[in-house]
Amino acid sequence: MAKRVTICLIGPKNGGKTSLLASAVDCVMQSAHGYPSDLRPAIQSITRAEFEGADAGAPHIDILDGHSEEYQELRREFAKGCAPTDALPTHEYFFRVTLNGIAPAEALEEAPYLVEVMDSGGDIAIPDDNAPNDIPQKSREEFSARLLKAEAIILVMPLVRLEDSGWIVNVARLFERLANAPEKNLKRVVVAFSQYERLFARFGPSAFTYACDPAVALYVLRNSLRTAQWMDSLRSLEAGANKVAVRFTVASSFGFVKIFQNPNVDPHQAGERRFRRSGIEGPRALNEFWRPFLTADPLLFSALELDSAFTFSYAQIDGAQSEPNFEQLNAPASS
């Protein structure tokens, strides 16, 4: 029987969490994750019916019917440049995660993994105190119940000055309440900082080379988290009786342009627009010229509890633990 894992995807409004989810499958397909190449993970969208009732190894599953239309629609919306999640209702997506190469024995024993990802608007879990919020109390209570049942939480936040935001205090409140909730089922938390590609906008064709260095990502995280008081609430989760594995990572849904290696943001268009070749529309342009980066790592760690070269523990962030041998981990720069 497959192992089932429920994940809550949370974050502030317009923080990039839905875009991260929309690009996760493409990230794995393009080997733009931080896992060793010989692990060979795969993520496939599936239907609710398969998640809830079918044995992942059962021969009666129709392989031609294995794709979830809801997730395909999410990918199409992201390709068009519009993938925000409305505050209501909560969106649910289902995936099958398989390991096709060398992996720890315990991970192979539980594979494949059937994963449910619950994605809600930022106004529910991480509201902005400076913006109007009219979410019904019933919706808040329903989402709180989902958080308590979830085995993993992925918190997506943009790489901005967090202390200047109107929602960062609610991050601390949320994890403080979770730490004090005895009935929680939580085992893993991943904090993913989105919009990683913005840091390399002036690096030209060297951008992807620098972004692929785990030491650079760790440096970015250490600087972003140096004065983050909300980290204390996460520490209490990790130090509690039911220890929760906490990891930090970076991610880029827009990613980088293939061949040219520069960040995939077009400076010649208004707003944030990805590069597209003139005359080519739809997913083909994305598949041909675009490489998302590390957007699958939070999902894979939440399901497998296996570290990649870009998932960092508290000990690594604090500098108490030396960095792993990233050459042995075979980071995506070498793929």
Image (spheres, rainbow, N blue to C red):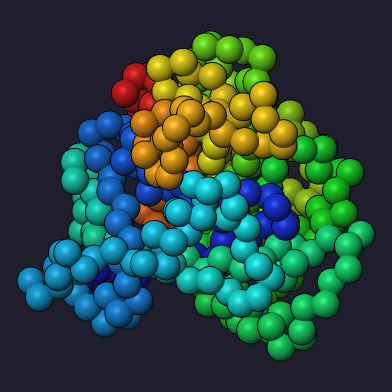
Q: Can residue 230 be seen in this snapshot?
A: yes
Instruction: Tell me: residue 68, above or below residue 282.
Output: below
- Quarter of the image with the N terminus in it: bottom left
Q: Position of residue 199 (x, y in %)?
A: 67, 24
Q: Residue at x 23, y 49 (%)?
A: 99
- Name the residue at the right extreme: 130
Is residue 198 rendered to the left or right of residue 326?
Answer: right
Q: Examine the rendered structure and indicate whether residue 273 appears above or below residue 332.
A: below
Percent coordinates x, y for residue 18 in the rendering? 57, 55
Residue drawn at x 30%, y 56% as measured from the top left:
44
Percent of width and height locating residue 248: 59, 42
In screen coordinates, is 293 left or right of 60?
A: right
> Residue 236 falls in which quadrant of the image?
bottom right
x then y, percent, for residue 61? 15, 72
Q: Quadrant of residue 119?
A: bottom right
- In the visual, does 153 lie left or right of 179? left
Image vertical order of residue 300 relative to residue 70, above or below: above
Quadrant the C terminus occupies: top left
Residue 151 visible in the snapshot = no
Which residue is painted at 51% across and 55% down in the image?
A: 77
- Is 81 or 41 nearer to us in this picture? 81
Name the quadrant containing residue 72. Answer: bottom left
